[in-house]
Amino acid sequence: MARGLAIVTAAATLVLILFGGLVTNTGAALAVPDWPTTFGYNMFLYPWSEMIGGIFYEHSHRLIGSVVGLLTLALAAALWRRGSTLRVLGVVAALAVVVQGLLGGMRVVLRQDVLAILHGCLAQAFFALLAVIVLLTSARTRAPLARIEPSTRNLALGAAAVAYVQIVLGALVTHAGIVDHHLVGPFAVFVIVPMLTARLRRSGDAVAAPLASVLLALLGV
C-alpha cells in the first residue's frame, strides 16, 4: 500500500509542479485574489464555469495541491506503520506539504515575491523527498546492494546540491529577475552529473546503476 501511495503522490506532485509553472508563466499567479477562499467561495465549491483564463490555471493549481496534501497525509499514515526511516520521512513529507500550502496561500495574501521563491524551491525539494520514499519502498532496496565508494557518495551529494542551487537560481530569475549566476549553473550541472552517472553505472549496484541511466536521460531533457 505504501509503495502505491508513494508513486501516486509523486505523480500527482509532478502534475502540481507543472501547473505551478503554468501559473507563473501565464501570469496567473494572482488571478484569484483571495485565499483560502476563491472569490469568496469555498475553494472546492467554486463554479467550474467560472474557471476561465488565468483563473483556470490558478484555481486548478489549488485543487491539485489539495489532492497532493491529502495523498501525502495518507502516505505518512501508511509509512508510520513501517517504522524506522520511512516513518520519519513520512512525517517530514506531511510537514513539508503543510508548509508548502501555507507558503502558496500567504503568497496570495501578502503578495511578496520572496514567498513565491520559497514556494517554488520547496516544491522541488518536496518532489525529491517523494522520489526517495518511492525508492525506499521498492523491493529492490531490500536486495543486497553493491558497496558505493565514499568518493562517489560525496559526488552524488555534490551533484544534488549543485542541481538544487540551480533550481533556486531559476526561481530568482523568474520572480526577481536576477539572471547573472543562473547562467553559470547549467555548466556546473552538465559537468558533475555525467561524472556521477558514469561512476554509478560502473558500480554495478542494482538500484544506483539503472537510476544513473535515467538521470542522464533527464539531463538531456
Image: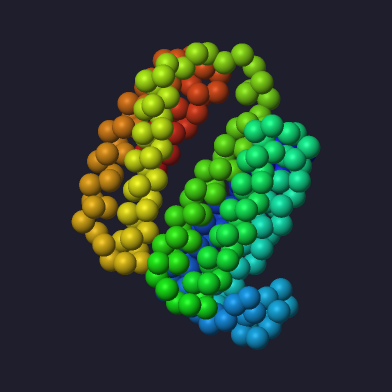
Residue 131: name its quadrant.
top right
Residue 32: name its quadrant.
bottom right
Specify whether residue 135 is in view.
yes
Image: 25 above or below 79? below
Question: Residue 119: percent from the left, percent from the top?
Answer: 48, 61
In this rendering, the count of numbered labels is 0
Q: Between residues 178 and 95, which one lies in front from this camera angle?
A: 95
Question: Residue 25: percent from the left, percent from the top?
Answer: 41, 67
Image: 109 above or below 147? below
Q: Between residues 208 and 161, which one lies in front from this camera angle?
A: 161
User: What's the residue at 52%, 13% (across, down)?
Assistant: 146
Specify whether residue 48 is in view.
no
Question: Residue 162: percent from the left, percent from the top?
Answer: 34, 41
Question: Residue 116: percent from the left, percent from the top?
Answer: 44, 66
Q: Between residues 198 and 184, which one lies in front from this camera angle?
A: 184
Q: How are the colours assigned in the image?
A: rainbow
Q: Decide if residue 23 is on the left or right side of residue 44.
A: left
User: What's the residue at 50%, 13% (across, down)?
Assistant: 147
User: What's the residue at 57%, 81% (across, down)?
Assistant: 34
Q: Decide if residue 213 is on the left or right side of residue 56.
A: left
Q: Residue furthest bottom?
A: 40
User: What's the residue at 48%, 50% (across, down)?
Assistant: 124
Image: 47 above or below 94? below
Image: 149 above or below 116? above
Quarter of the figure that contains the N terminus: top right
Quarter of the figure that contains the C terminus: top left
